Amino acid sequence: RMVFVSPRLPVLLIAATLWLAASPARAQAPVVLEESTASVRLGRHLAIRADPKGKLTIAQVSRPDAADQFKPSRWDVPNFGFTDTVYWLRVTLVNRASRDTLWLLEAAYPPLDRIELYEPLAGKPGRFTRRVLGDRRPFAEREVKHRHAIFRVTLPAGATRTLYLRCQSESSMQ
């Protein structure tokens, strides 16, 4: 599961477990974050793309002409079961708060082997920063010392950002 948490509380949780939704392509509703937002479940805000060979790059999946390769999630908690397939997740966040805000994006599923977060670089279209977490990475490298993979995400006031996550695991993915 993925969770997004506000620093106003310890964390803004966006719960999103991985499950490939086979439904017609359509734009997912963005996650609107306000000063009063404490927690958001991401499941139905996700767009998901399967990468069976695990070879796709952020440049390939983030191209505008690749947008229709993502399918909308129809579940609160997507679940891919046991699979060798890599899954890419896309979510758009809108910060309606009057100030820059720190949020926590939590993959609330401890056995996830590897999760990569790609955040767009401001003023550099098509460029991203990449951060990697997962149960195969040293615990000391975690941004937040917790059993779940948690990324810190700062959103400027009034900003809209589309984040990408690349998820891979030898166990089940939820």
Image (tube, rainbow, N blue to C red):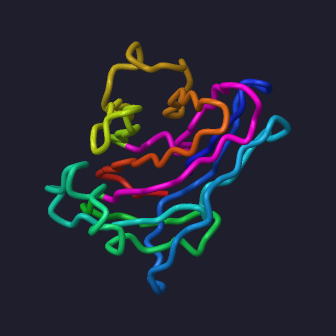
| Residue 131 position within the rendered picture, expressed as x and y whole percent measured from the top left | 35, 30
Out of 13 and 26, give the one closest to the viewer: 26
Q: Residue furthest top?
A: 140
Quadrant of the rendered structure where residue 9 is?
Answer: top right
**What range of the chain is rendered magenta?**
87-112
96 sits to left or right of 145: right
Q: Quadrant of residue 48?
A: bottom left
Vertical arrangement, residue 86 with respect to residue 104, above or below:
below
Q: Is residue 4 left or right of residue 38?
A: left
At x 36%, y 64%, the residue is: 82
Above or below: residue 122 compared with residue 125? above
Q: Residue at x 34, y 66 (%)?
A: 49
Position of 20 relative to 34 (above/below): below
What secondary structure characterizes most of the magenta part? strand
> In the image, is residue 107 part of the stretch drawn in magenta?
yes
| Residue 61, position as x, y percentages in the image | 27, 58
